[in-house]
Image: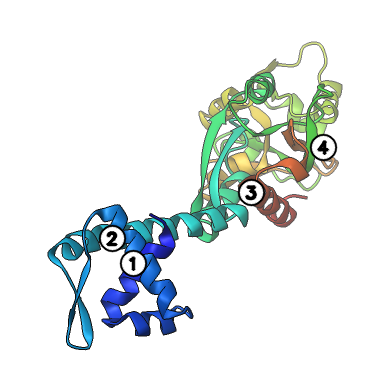
Amino acid sequence: MDINQLEAFDHVVRLGSFSKAARHLNLSQPTISVRIQGLEKEVGSGLFHRVGKRVELTDAGKGFLPYARQAIELVANGIEKARLIQEGKAGHVTIGTLSTFTSGVFSSVMAHLNTRFPDVHVEIHTGHNQEIIEMLYDGFIKLGLVTNPYHNTDLKTILTMKEPLTLVAHPSHPLASVSDESRTSLEIIENSDPYIIVDWSTESKHWQKSMTHPGLNFMELPPSTAFDLVLSENGVALLTESMVKKELETNQLVKLQPVDFPLLYREIALVSLDSERSLSPAAKTIVEIFRSRSAITSI
């Protein structure tokens, strides 16, 4: 039993004639007859009987019809699904990302993916750099988003994205009420009480360390802890703009902009153990969305 036999059967039912079914399928009438005979042999019973110039279903044919049509639909759906997968419009992709890179570019990519390619399903796992790299080696994820530079020669960088960093404080902090027009970075850090150092990149950490000196009230914390501390009215921290976007918009935090503040950023690398050419079509679709969205939202 094959799909051609089932389609011939369905067309004969719909059109009530072997000859009409043959014309509709652009086949000869003997070909249709052979296909129906083969199907009847598989079923073990006649499927049609003639009534005047038309053919009608036998009881066995009536019982077989819904299952034949269901099989035709399933095959058609399977062919369509395979086509969508090949075109990168369907599939399943596992991604590992830093917990501090789940807003901004990342959320924009996920929203765009859900709108344009709802049949591409993404499974997301979070961790720090080494955990994400281990997930890649274990085959648990296919794509990883890690802080660049990373120190692993097996990984292939597919693209990089830059996130601007900014100094933030709670609106109740004394520094929040002072104009930034003539204030230097050192003055802000010396009056942060405490200044919270966050390791985003070699450059940003070097800049922060260069501002510290004996007697300065400072501490070094991971990003999420620094964010929580500043939000609870303690100190000043250098955080990614995407991380604090909502809080800045709702005035839960304020941006401090000293006159000598350098352009600092965190660089994120989208990596895989496979080259971009070797990725699945669905994974390539996600890469292209990251490429387009990061061009819009990153510096």
196 versus 288 height, above or below? above
Residue 27 coordinates in the image, percent (x, y): 47, 78
Query: Mark 4 falls on what kind of element?
Result: loop
Query: Mark 2 falls on what kind of element?
Result: helix
Query: Mark 3 falls on what kind of element?
Result: helix
Q: Amino acid at mark 1?
A: Ile
Mark 1 neighbour density, 10 Å: few (under 14) some (14–19) many (20 or more): many
Mark 4 or mark 3: name the one nearer the start of the chain: 4
Tell me how far mark 2 sits from mark 1, CA to CA.
6 Å
Residue at horizontal 74 percent and vertical 41 percent from the top: 278
> Do the residues under discs 2 and 1 have CB atoms within 8 angstroms?
yes
What residue is pinned by disc 3? 286
Viewer-nearest of discs 4 and 2: 2
Q: Residue furthest left?
A: 59
Q: Where's the N terminus, which quadrant?
A: bottom left
Viewer-nearest of discs 3 and 1: 1
Q: Residue furthest top?
A: 214
What residue is pinned by disc 1? 36
- What's the mark number on residue 184? 4
Mark 3 neighbour density, 10 Å: few (under 14) some (14–19) many (20 or more): many
* Image quadrant assignment for residue 14: bottom left
- What's the mark number on residue 40? 2
Q: Amino acid at mark 3?
A: Ile
Tell me how far mark 2 sits from mark 3, CA to CA.
48 Å
